[in-house]
Amino acid sequence: MPQALNNQNDAARRARLGQRQQERQMRLARRRKRQRTIVGVVVVVLVIIVVWLGFVEYHNYQANQQALQSKHATATALASITPTPSAGPATPPAVTGTPKTLPGGLQYIDVKQGTGKTVASGNKISVQYTGWLQSNGKKFDSSYDHGGQPFSVTVGQGQVIKGWDEGLIGMKVGGTRRLIIPPSLGYGAQGQPPTIPANATLIFDVTAVSGS
């Protein structure tokens, strides 16, 4: 009997040891599972942070690029704007092209082709101009010498000399035309003392700023 009891006690101890080992293994398994879960969560969080930082960097890059493009466009636009001169040229600038001659003797050269409305008789336009004497190239008047304020005229209504009434027709707003006006279409034999002598041929550079 004592031997049998000892055998039973040994079996019970072995059973308890086996159970404790199983419990230990289960705890280890649970611990490893928790660790894997924690690691997985950390990895996911890190991935989210990296993606978010990448999005922020991309957004900042796009914003910087747009700002640079905007600055470049503004600088280009400003560079393309020709400032209004504070005074007209003292002598007629050199131009290229063959003058076209009208029946009355008026000659003109389109120095710059405009892209706006074509000027017709009866149109009101605003112009910038400078005038010189052909004989000596001396300037006698310029809108730029009067603060750069454009001069308004209704074409073909006798508000200006005939050379202008005829010479402005056909040019386009935004364009510049050189007019070479004989005395008969300018100030004639009387001239306009003291700046314009009698029988003077006149040279005008006229830029059509706007028109209606």
Image: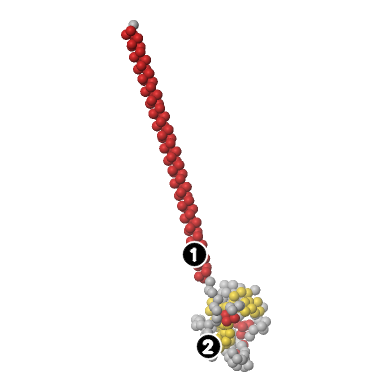
Please say whether residue 177 is visible from this viewpoint.
no
Q: Residue at x 36, y 16 (%)?
A: 13
Quadrant holding the N terminus:
top left
Q: On the image, numbered disc 1 is attached to which residue?
A: 72
Please say whether residue 212 is visible from this viewpoint.
yes
Quadrant holding the C terminus:
bottom right
Residue farthest to the front, as pictured: 2
Q: Secondary structure at mark 1?
A: helix
Q: Residue at x 58, y 78 (%)?
A: 148
Circle on res. 115: none
Q: Position of residue 132 (x, y in %)?
A: 55, 86
Q: Secondary structure at mark 2?
A: loop
Instruction: Using the image as rendered, state which of residue 142 and residue 136 is in the foreground.
Output: 142
* 77 with respect to 126 (left or right): left
Q: How is the image coloured?
A: secondary structure
Badge 2 local density, few (<14 within 10 Å), some, or many (20+)?
some
Residue farthest to the top, as pictured: 1
Q: Label 2 is placed on what type of residue?
A: Gly
* 119 with respect to 23 (left or right): right
Circle on res. 137: 2
Badge 1 local density, few (<14 within 10 Å), some, or many (20+)?
few
Q: Residue at x 50, y 67 (%)?
A: 75
Is label 1 in contact with label 2 (beta carbons under 8 Å)? no
Instruction: Using the image as rendered, state which of residue 139 and residue 41 is in the foreground.
Output: 41
Instruction: Using the image as rendered, state which of residue 167 and residue 93 is in the foreground.
Output: 93
Q: Label 1 is placed on what type of residue?
A: His
Task: Look at discs 1 and 2 and give the one toward the viewer.
Answer: 1
Q: Position of residue 43 (x, y in %)?
A: 42, 40
Determine the image quadrant of residue 104. Answer: bottom right
Q: Position of residue 10 (x, y in %)?
A: 34, 14
